Image: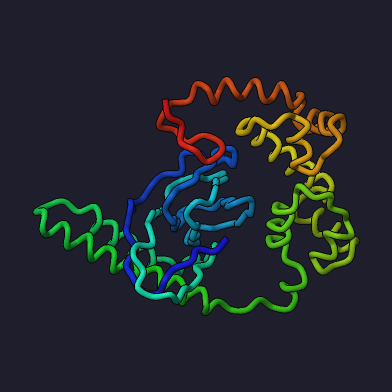
Amino acid sequence: MHLELHTMGLPVIERIGRYPLVNPVFDFTYRNPTHTVHLYNYPGRVRVDGKVYKFEPGDLTCIRSGSVYSFESDEPRDHWCVHFFSGEQSDTRQIELPPILQIGVNSLFLREQLKHISSLFNACGKEEHVELMKVEARYRLKAFLLSVYLQSCGRTKRTRREQVFNMESLLAWLEEHLPEALSVEQVARQAGVSRATLAKHFRDKQGMTLSQYLLHKRIDRAKSLLITTSLTVCEVGASVGIADPQYFNKQFRKVDGQSPTHYRESHRMFVDNMSSGEAIQGGEWRGR
């Protein structure tokens, strides 16, 4: 889901700063009433409304308000983050910010802009000066967002070979279609390659077969649903593409070494004991 932005009107900043990534696993999800932009200082993946994007240091993501998102990283550090509302709009023209913009080493300019906006918004001092600085922060954030949009328009087109097969795009598509009964033929057709080529790519890049990959992804999603929802075990299995309850139980044990019911009970104890200020699964903030 793209983040839509009006060309006129100023955004209203809710918070901005440099924050550490404290929950680098997909089980911990977030949902905010604000739009959110992240500029990363570490590699990882972000899942937004079920779709996964891989990012490297210097990449930027734009997340629309209300979206459920989570992060996964083996090297969690910190990132620049701004939460904002669209604010009052004086026109009807809209542009779409990209879900991810891969900038890499050329991100220094954007990072310095966010740093400056943060210093303006979080400034202390005389009240009249502080208010003016917050207004300047809003103008600069608007310019920043328009700059991101223009950079996304200038991205070079993919080569023909990349259009034929792109593993990252295929993995994102698989993540989105996990609840479906996917056949090898269907996945190969989506990737634009033969079954043999698809199998080779998965062996070379993922170290497993397509079937093994889908099974592990389905069980990962099932784990999240078992903890965060009141769905029955049968309903969880059906929602991740394994409709047969006995087969779902068997495959869950095969991957995780325990039954879905046992997994749910053991992790519910953990959720019940979490502090009130900590984000929990399902994208909600726990309150006492």
Q: How far across and how far down the image is residue 54, in percent?
A: 60, 56
**Count of marks placed on residues:** 0
Q: How far across and how far down the image is residue 63, in percent?
A: 50, 57
Q: Could one spot residue 131 in this view of the protein?
A: yes
Q: How is the image coloured?
A: rainbow
Return the residue nearer the eye: 45 or 200.
Answer: 45
Return the residue nearer the eye: 35 or 200.
Answer: 35
Left/right placement of residue 262 relative to residue 54 reads right
Instruction: Name the quadrant of the C terminus.
Output: top left
Placement of 60 over or under 92, stated as above or below: above
Return the residue nearer the eye: 229 or 182.
Answer: 229
Instruction: Name the quadrant of the N terminus.
Output: bottom right
Residue at (72, 58) in percent of width and height: 173
Location of residue 230 by image quarter: top right
Left/right placement of residue 27 relative to residue 168 reads left
Residue at (17, 63) in percent of width and height: 132
Residue at (78, 47) in percent of width and height: 214
Return the residue nearer the eye: 198 or 243.
Answer: 243
Placement of 240 over or under 260, stated as above or below: below
Q: How far across and how far down the image is residue 170, in percent?
A: 73, 60
Q: How far across and how far down the image is residue 88, in percent?
A: 34, 65
Residue at (49, 68) in percent of width and height: 97
Placement of 39 over or under 262, stated as above or below: below
Q: Could one spot residue 143 in this view of the protein?
A: no
